[in-house]
């Protein structure tokens, strides 16, 4: 019988394969971390893949000047509030309404425009990535969620998987692990749309403010 660790590794790989079937790029996160084969972060404290986000903002907002895109990028990267929940709510408004960015027009006027973070009309304009074993270090605490899903370089989903073969481990343990991440590496959840917990058979999804009974069963469109 395979060990529990091997089983969980297989579950991670299965999850990545499902994302790949949906058209996501997949990555082993250590390859894109500082010092990896294809680094996309300069520091373990960074949770956004900045170059992917820059490229997406340019692609989705081709009519806006670089100054406006830079302002939007800064607002996304640098949260305004000390509280995670406030920052998460602010980012969700950015998702739906766009980022209110300013720039100086050719005639000298200061102009405000909405910069879109995601393209909801042309899905192919977005960048989709799922990475496993994504290490984050915050306040000298290191954590490594099982799978993080990025859209345009922004970590929208965190997935925690537990071993169904281990009778001592339940799906509640995955929920508790998500709560541990929220308390120790909150920056990863500034942009979180929802978290997923699964034992390989059952899957539930909830938000950063949801207690365990508000993590609901995952349903397919069928």
Image (cartoon, grey):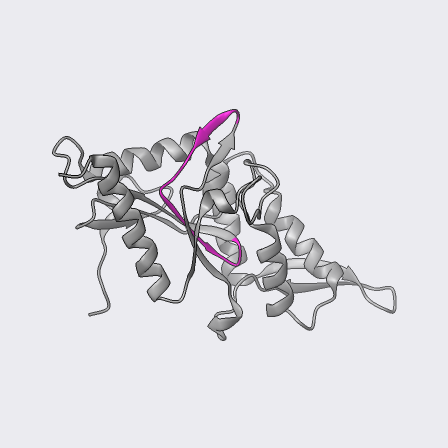
Point out residue 166 in the picture as x, y percentages from the top left corner.
15, 35
Q: Is residue 152 on the magenta stretch?
A: yes
99 over 105 or under it: above or below: above
Q: Is residue 204 on the magenta stretch?
A: no
Is 211 situated left or right of 155 in this image?
left
| Residue 59 seen in the figure | yes
Q: Hey, which quadrant is residue 167 in on the image? A: top left
Residue at image x 55%, y 36%? 45
Q: Which residues are magenta?
A: 139-153
Quadrant, the N terminus: top left
Is 107 situated left or right of 153 in this image?
right
Number of callouts in the render? 0
Point out residue 88 in the picture as x, y percentages from the top left corner.
48, 45
Quadrant, the C terminus: bottom left
Residue at image x 61%, y 46%? 77
Residue at image x 34%, y 34%? 179
19 over 206 or under it: above or below: below
| Residue 190 seen in the figure | no
Name the outermost residue toward the bottom.
122
54 over 200 or under it: above or below: below
Residue at image x 35%, y 66%? 22
């Amino acid at each position: 019988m395979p060990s529990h660790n091997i089983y969980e590794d297989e579950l991670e790989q299965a999850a990545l394969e499902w994302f790949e079937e949906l058209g996501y790029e997949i990555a082993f996160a250590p390859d894109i971390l500082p010092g990896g084969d294809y680094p996309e972060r300069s520091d373990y404290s960074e949770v956004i893949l900045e170059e992917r986000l820059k490229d997406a903002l340019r692609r989705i907002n081709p009519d806006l000047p670089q100054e406006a895109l830079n302002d939007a990028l800064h607002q996304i990267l640098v949260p305004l509030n000390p509280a995670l929940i406030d920052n998460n709510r602010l980012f969700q408004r950015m998702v739906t309404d766009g980022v209110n960015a300013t720039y100086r027009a050719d005639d000298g006027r200061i102009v405000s425009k909405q910069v879109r973070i995601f393209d909801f009309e042309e899905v192919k304009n977005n960048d989709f990535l799922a990475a496993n074993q994504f290490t984050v270090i915050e306040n000298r605490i290191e954590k490594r969620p099982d799978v993080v899903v990025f859209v345009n370089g922004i970590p929208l989903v965190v997935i925690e998987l537990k071993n169904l073969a281990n009778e001592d481990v339940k799906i509640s343990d995955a929920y508790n692990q998500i709560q541990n991440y929220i308390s120790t590496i909150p920056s990863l959840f500034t942009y979180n749309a929802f978290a997923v917990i699964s034992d390989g058979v059952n899957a539930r999804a909830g938000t950063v403010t949801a207690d365990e009974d508000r993590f609901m069963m995952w349903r397919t469109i069928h």
